[in-house]
Amino acid sequence: MLSRILAAVDDSEGGKKAFDFAVALSKKFESSLLIAHVIEEHGTVGHSVVSELEQDSQRILQKYQAKARDSGLKSSHVNVIEGKGTDVAEKILEIAREENMDAIVVGGRGKYLSSDSFLLGSTSSKLVHYGGYTIIIVK
């Protein structure tokens, strides 16, 4: 049922909680865990900023991969992927489709908040409305 779980993470408190929940699910169901971080691309961002975002993304993924292994998950069951796109929710769904995931675990609010994400983060809200997957939002 839940053999492949995608944990969409960032450096927010919600991302950390989502990761912890995804690890617990992976342990309970002996599932493989794919840890994903998406870099949101903006057309007006210069090369140096993109480079900095890529380095930050790699740091985040390495940190979560190490935490997954330290939690007792088998290394063969833990993978990471970095995505880039103009819409984070769309990219998460694309990764989930390409990797044949069963469920997506995401924080209720991410690193960046906007006025249109007062009750629920815009990414998690889009995932619920447009995703054809089991979406678990951790608050």
Image (spheres, rainbow, N blue to C red):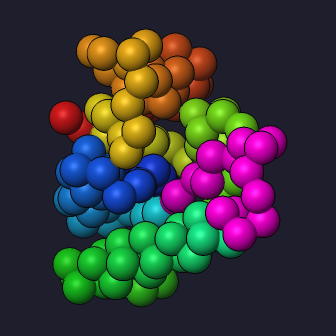
Q: Is residue 63 above or below residue 21?
A: below
- Quadrant housing residue 130: top right
- Quadrant housing residue 29: bottom left
Stretch of the chain drawn in magenta = 36-50
In the visual, does 45 lie left or right of 35? Answer: right
Q: Is residue 135 above or below residue 94?
A: above
Q: Tell me residue 43's x, y (percent).
A: 80, 42
In this view of the protein, which residue sits in the foreground, 111 or 69?
111
Verify whether residue 5 appears in magenta.
no
Residue drawn at x 57%, y 76% as measured from the top left: 55
Count up the numbered dots. 0
- Quadrant housing residue 89: top right
Q: Is residue 110 above or below residue 60?
A: above
Q: Is residue 9 above or below residue 119?
A: below
Residue drawn at x 20%, y 78% as measured from the top left: 71
Tell me the quarter of the image containing the N terminus: top left
Q: Tell me residue 85's x, y (percent).
A: 72, 45
Q: Tell me residue 51's x, y (percent).
A: 68, 71
Verify whether residue 44 appears in magenta.
yes
Tell me the quarter of the image containing the C terminus: top left
In the visual, does 48 lie left or right of 61? Answer: right
Question: Can see residue 35?
Answer: yes
Q: Tell me residue 44's x, y (percent).
A: 77, 44
Residue drawn at x 47%, y 63% as measured from the top left: 35
